[in-house]
Amino acid sequence: MACGEFSLIARYFDRVKSARLDVETGIGDDCALLNIPEKKTLAISTDTLVAGNHFLPDIDPADLAYKALAVNLSDLAAMGAEPAWLTLALTLPEVDETWLEAFSDSLFVQLDYYDMQLIGGDTTRGPLAMTLGIHGFVPPGRAMKRAGAKPGDWIYVTGTPGDSAAGLAVLQNRLTVDEPSDADYLLARHLRPMPRVLQGQALRDLATSAIDLSDGLISDLGHILKASGCGARIDLDAMPYSDAILRQV
């Protein structure tokens, strides 16, 4: 890269407003030094997002930063964990400072909102891609897992399924939405999904199992059923579809 890695990190990614008390050493050293609070279990999730596979190559960088973090936060939410730390490995085809500024600004707005800290990462040159490692805490023995569902349990979702897929279809010109407000809503649900962090924590002592629905209700419910060794019946009339989706069918 024309711009050195260290100057790139310092300029766009080393800007913590107030360090978390559990971070002894963050960005700027060979490793981050972290202190896990007493009576907490560490929850870790890692996702790699590649342009053309997981997001459109021409996505707005602010939307990309939001979506990338939201996808990882949803994994923590599914376990009932409280977000804490993030690592980011970013692969860029070139150094575009306008792109980097928009991406990092959006990322840090979300990190501040969730009281998270970027503790390290890496940058390199290549096709646009990123790997995020997210860390959080959950009380011992209270994490929600895929295994645990049993016959007689009710199946609940915390959002309105299908919105994100419809938003992607709008972006790819596979779906025409006549009402502009509906199109805006569906696009927002795809580009800026709301991770159910607080809902996940509230459900820790209520749900027998849980999963993030990033792959869709049927696919992800199948993961729960396989892990739990049971089947399921879905009442389609009770599905909480959004008005924007219902107006398309």
Image: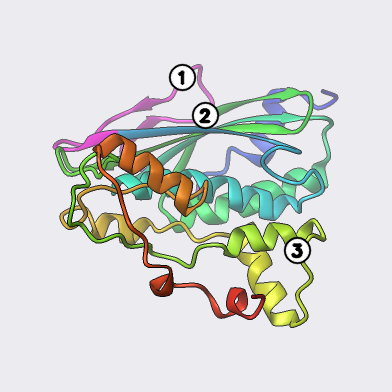
Nearer the N terminus, badge 3 or badge 2?
Answer: 2
Magenta segment: 17-42
- Report x, y in % for residue 154: 24, 61
* Residue ID for mark 1: 31
Q: Tell which circle, 3 or 1, labels the residue nearer the N-terminal end.
A: 1
Disc nearer the start of the sequence (2/1): 1
In the displayed structure image, the side of residue 215 where residue 51 appears, left or right: right
Q: What residue type is labelled 2?
A: Gly
- Does residue 156 appear left or right of residue 245 in this picture? left
Q: Which residue is drawn at 39% across and 48% down?
A: 221
Whether residue 135 can be seen here? yes
* Residues at marks 2 and 1 touching, judged by CB atoms closer than 8 Å: yes
Who's the residue at 79% across and 28% down the image?
Answer: 127
Q: Tell me the distance, in whole angstroms, between the alpha carbons under discs 3 and 1.
A: 42 Å
Mark number, residue 170: 3
Q: What element carries label 1?
A: loop
Q: Position of residue 1 (x, y in %)?
A: 82, 23
| Residue 21 on the magenta segment | yes
- 229 shown above or below 105: above
Q: Name the residue under label 2.
A: 120
